[in-house]
Amino acid sequence: MKSQVVIIGRSHSKVVNDIVIGDKSICYIDELNYLGWYILSANVFHISLYYTRVRFFQCFNSLYAKSNNFSNLFYSTFEHVL
């Protein structure tokens, strides 16, 4: 089943009864991915930007490493170490 439940509010850390639809239960999770946003279970509404930030720097580093100036910049920066 693709359904998940995240609890937001005072009871976010309490153990609650499972929600059952038909013969399948819906799982409670601490972090919900919805349209690229990660909604966290907390006292108030929180969105985690961790995965967005990681993905941004992965893309940036990939593009930066493939640029023409990367090798020149790398060797000039670490010239004293070599």
Image (cartoon, grey):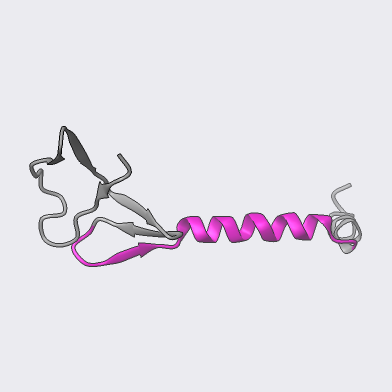
Residue at 15% x, 50% y is 13
In the rendered structure, the answer to whether residue 71 lies left or right of residue 15 reads: right
Instruction: Give the quadrant of residue 59.
Output: bottom right
Residue 77 position within the rendered picture, expressed as x and y whole percent measured from the top left = 84, 60
In the rendered structure, the answer to whether residue 14 lies left or right of residue 4 reads: left
Residue at 11% x, 60% y is 10
Instruction: Give the quadrant of residue 74.
Output: bottom right
Q: Which residues are magenta?
A: 42-68
> Is 66 one of the magenta-colored residues?
yes
- Residue at the farthest front position: 22
Residue 25 position within the rendered picture, expressed as x and y whole percent measured from the top left = 18, 37
Main SS of residues in magenta: helix
- Residue at the farthest top position: 23
Which of the image's four quarters has the N terminus?
Answer: top left
Residue 47 position within the rendered picture, expressed as x and y whole percent measured from the top left = 36, 64
Residue at 71% x, 57% y is 61
- Residue at the farthest bottom position: 45
Depth order, front residue of 25/56: 25
Tally of numbered discs: 0
Up-down: is 23 above or below 52?
above
> Is 53 one of the magenta-colored residues?
yes
Residue 48 position within the rendered picture, expressed as x and y whole percent measured from the top left = 39, 60
Instruction: Give the quadrant of residue 64.
Output: bottom right
Depth order, front residue of 19/8: 19
